[in-house]
Image (spheres, rainbow, N blue to C red):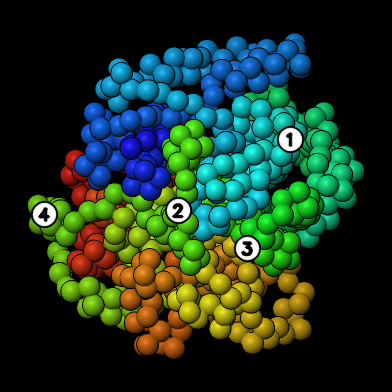
Amino acid sequence: MLILGISAFYHDSAACLVRDGRILFAAQEERFSRKKHDAEFPEKALAACFATTGVKAADLDFVVFYEKPLLKFDRLFSTFLQFAPRGLKNYLKVVPLWAQNRIFIKDTIKEKIGRPDLPVLFTSHHASHIASAFYPSPFNEAAVLTVDAVGEWDALTLAKAEGPDFEILKRISFPHSLGMLYTAFTYFCGFKVNSGEYKLMGLAPYGEPVYKDKIYDELIDVKDDGSFRLNLKYFSFTTGRTMTGKKFEKLFGLPRRLPETEIRKADMDLAASIQAVLEEILEKIVRTARVLVPSENLCLAGGVALNCVANGKLLKKQIFKNIWIQPAAGDAGGALGAALYVWHKHLKNPRVVAGDGRDGQSGSFLGPSYSVDEIRTFLEENRIPHRELTREDIARRTAELIDAGKVVGFFQGRMEFGPRALGGRSILGDARSTEMQSIMNLKIKFRESFRPFAPSILEENVADYYDFDRPSPYMLLVYNVKEDRRSPEGPEDKNRRGLDKLYLQRSEIPAVTHVDYSARLHTVSADVNPYYYAVIKEFYKRTGCPVVINTSFNVRGEPIVCTPQDAYRCFIRTNMDFLVLETFLIEKRPEDYIQKDTAWMKEFTPD
């Protein structure tokens, strides 16, 4: 049986295809449209789904949308009535736009797919998240926690899951939302809502949590069991199109930081404070979950589950022995969850769990791939100089280039599903370099210098470098570099504050060690990603270091690359030194810095 899951019309729209409970394909629309966080109906992702799997629209048995539009409209209308007449102007703008997309969503889906007879189902937003977290997990039973900004009404749900079924035990409803609280600080510190939250998390170690008590005293009332209520007078998301207003500014004694302006010490302290509050509240909620659900396993989904710092601290406390997080924890993952929901909960089909710790996510390599023949044709038609090597030679040569201080774009296999590059669409560099973090941030990624990079490490070596002893294949857990790998601090280093901390060499692998000695771990195994594993293994043989820098293959403001054309465009427009496209090696030449006047180079140039 073939079930198509769709998420769309808020942000990060996606398409997912499931056959008999197995995920065949999943990808975000942004990767094909080249519009970051694209919310439109995922037509291009759907076309790629059919092309990759060979499935046709006529083969589908069900299509399922990831939330219930009428229930969401109930929330919009009820919220307006609660706060009226405030918010009238915003309501009159939002509702017609919303109605245009959603009231007739069933007809839209049938029209886009080309199947007027196709059965269209709907799940709730949080049911999709719960399904996305539990059904692909390696657990027979688990507690499932979903925390996000808001679905229809739910902003937090706790479920008990076993076999093919789950039951929601507790929920917290909009407008009381941890996701909204964290996003309010994201907005106030000058980062973009629904995409800049990870920047706030990365900024937190540069500050001190000096505003933590003020947040607890004025913004949120938290009970011992983790339940909470926001003080809504400080927020404007219920009535306007911004997150905070003048009362928020008055509370903290400073104006909102405008985007692209200098980051203030107060912004660092605000980031540290809200990160600490989030971690403490999540711990209380998880402890309550452990009491209510007699299991050693916890699954996480929702946008807040992408806060890998909080995830790592939860696992370290061992409230639950095991944690599994949906790699596409945000709205894109709702498409996957909705499809699995129909197969298991709606149609009552059993789950099959491997039993050896493996999950059903296939390393999250669920998008399209491009053959050697397709890439060769592209290179030859555009007269791009290249060398074709064996995979063994490419792995060895890539390791040599990284060791020589070169930056390599690495493109191979199926594209990753979710916001993280995991070795399929990655940019690689030398983790031992003291300069590589700044070089890659400013000359390759064109982004803020404080942003940390993740290490990719051979799975079997992770405990040699980090206080961690299990796989972390999806880059969703933060742990610390071991004491014996750290660099000793001098007397002057202890007094560094703010962004001055950036210039301290903190470990043997400084380019992937954050200012608090932490790292967002990505462990690489030979069975899940053999080609990328071979590159790191060759680097290890050559240098004695089983760690390389892994950052997503894109520049600031662009989605991760999808096609060989996307990869070459990104390569040409940055200071990357080499590009690997499957078994082809391309070297940057001086004349390549001049943008080529070809249609495919211009086609997806972002605004």
Name which of mark 2 and mark 3 comes first in the sequence: 3
Decide: is 360 above or below 175: below
Query: Are circles 2 and 3 on residues that touch, CB within 8 Å?
Result: no
Label 3 element class? strand
Query: Are circles 2 and 1 on residues that touch, CB within 8 Å?
Result: no
- Name the spot of residue 552 as percent of width and height, x first: 43, 58
Name which of mark 2 and mark 1 comes first in the sequence: 1
Q: Residue 215 carries which label?
A: none
- Mark 2 vs mark 3, CA separation in Å: 19 Å
Q: In this view, does 531 lie to the left or right of 307?
A: left
Q: Which image quadrant for residue 236?
A: top right
- Residue 338 visible at all: no
Mark 3, Cα crowd under 10 Å, few <14 / some 14-19 / many 20+, is some
Name which of mark 4 and mark 3 comes first in the sequence: 3
Camera-nearest residue between 598 and 74: 74
Name which of mark 3 and mark 1 comes first in the sequence: 1
Q: Which image quadrant for residue 495?
A: bottom right
Nearest to the eye among marks 1 and 4: give it. 1
Q: Residue 352 carries which label?
A: 2
Decide: is 4 above or below 548: above
- The amino acid type, in three-letter code, at marker 1 is Ile
The residue located at (56%, 30%) in the rendering is 124
Report the residue marked by disc 4.
377
Q: Residue 172 carries which label?
A: 1
- Name the spot of residue 573 as percent of width and height, x first: 32, 54
The residue located at (61%, 46%) in the rendering is 161
